[in-house]
Each structure stands twice: as C-alpha cells, then as structure tokens.
C-alpha cells in the first residue's frame, strides 16, 4: 500500500494518532517523511511496525522490550536465544503477577466468607480488615526499620 497520513496509519493499526506520535518520540517509529504542507507520511513498513508493537504489548511486553524485539528482528547477526530470553523473563513476570493475583483472590474470598452481610457496615469484617491492614503494614515497616538500625549499630560496635 502507498503512503498514509497519520490518521490513516492510526486507523489502519487500530490506535490513536497520539499513539503514533508517542512511538515516534520514543524512537519506536522512524521520523516520517513530510508532505510540502507538513503532513507526516508513513508507509506499509510503519504499519507493520506499529502492528508488531501492539502485538507485543497485547502479550504483556513493555515498549522497551518491544524495542529490543524490533532490534533483534532487524539484526542480521542476532540469535533467537535473545528473543527467547526476553520471552522467558516475561513469562516469569507473568507467573509472579498470577501468584500475586491468586493471593489477592484468596484473601478476598476469605473476607467475603467471614462477612455475614446482614450486620451494619460498622460491624463489617471486610471494612475492619481494610482499615487495620494499612495501619499494620505501616507499623511493621517502622518495626523493621528500627530493627535494621539496631542491627547496623551492633555491626558498627563489633567492627
């Protein structure tokens, strides 16, 4: 296909114009040619590149990872192992997020199971938990910081 103006490229790729401009600013897309009137002109290579970036994002890759994948794809000397390494790191990240989401789900189920529903909200165990949780986390951080400080002082005395 021929040249696209920014709106045409955006529509063909299913993204907004601002996304195209952002990709340009981030160096994910080359600086486009311009018409005499100053309109940006893109070609099929740019459309394919935007589609590649969006596909990568849909699988959870960051824009920086998409940039690396694009560079690897364009390389004459790169090996698939580099792509595999990025992909395996993304899998590990996804597994960690899934584990965290599973923990959240389990906590929410426990809270829901403990809530009788017919009590006034002032007696709601879910609200009580949410109120106490943040206070407990902040208290534990303070305790840990004090413990770390004592440990550092003890190391200084022993040295």
Image: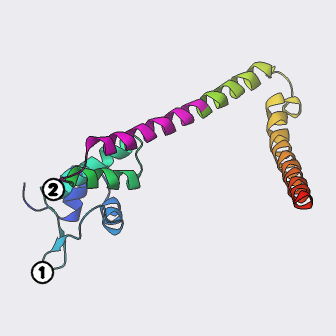
Report x, y in % for residue 15: 31, 53
> In the image, 135: left or right of 63?
right
Label 1: element kind: loop
Q: Earlier in the sequence, mark 1 or mark 2?
A: 1
- Under circle 2, the secondary element is helix
From this view, report whether residue 65 is shown above or below residue 121. Answer: below
Compared across the picture, whether 84 is left or right of 77 comes to: right
Residue closest to the eye, 109 or 102:
102
In this picture, is 141 found above or below 126?
below
Q: Quadrant of residue 64?
A: bottom left
Give the camera-side residue of 2 and 87: 87
Residue drawn at (90%, 57%) of the image: 158
The dot on residue 36 is 1
Q: Position of residue 72 (x, y in %)?
A: 27, 51
Determine the residue positioned at 26% across, 48% down.
52
Question: How is the protein colored in the picture?
Answer: rainbow
Mark 1 or mark 2: which is in front? 2
Q: Nearer the viewer, residue 76 or 155?
A: 155
Residue located farthest toward the left when viewing the structure as drawn: 2
Q: Quadrant of residue 123?
A: top right
Residue segment shown in magenta: 76-99
Tell me the quarter of the image containing the C terminus: bottom right
Q: Is residue 150 visible?
A: yes
Magenta-drawn stretch contains 23: no
Q: Is residue 145 above or below residue 41?
A: above
Residue 119, position as x, y percentages in the image: 86, 24
The residue that appears at 84% across and 53% down in the rendered structure is: 148
The answer to whether mark 1 and mark 2 are in CB contact below 8 A is: no
- Asked whether residue 14 is in view, the answer is no
Residue for badge 2: 45
The quarter of the rendered structure image containing the N terminus is bottom left
């Amino acid at each position: 296909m021929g040249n696209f103006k920014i709106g045409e490229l955006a529509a063909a790729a299913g993204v907004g114009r601002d996304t195209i401009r952002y990709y340009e600013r981030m160096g994910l897309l080359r600086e486009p040619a311009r018409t005499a009137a100053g309109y940006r002109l893109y070609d099929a290579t740019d459309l394919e590149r935007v589609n590649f970036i969006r596909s990568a994002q849909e699988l959870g890759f960051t824009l920086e990872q998409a940039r690396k994948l694009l560079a690897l794809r364009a390389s004459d000397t790169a090996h698939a192992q580099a792509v595999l390494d990025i992909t395996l790191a993304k899998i590990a990240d996804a597994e960690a997020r899934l584990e965290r989401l599973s923990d959240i789900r389990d906590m929410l189920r426990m809270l829901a199971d403990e809530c009788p529903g017919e009590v006034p909200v002032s007696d709601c165990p879910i609200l009580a938990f949410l109120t106490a949780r943040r206070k407990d986390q902040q208290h534990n951080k303070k305790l840990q910081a004090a413990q770390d400080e004592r440990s550092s002082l003890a190391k200084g005395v022993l040295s």
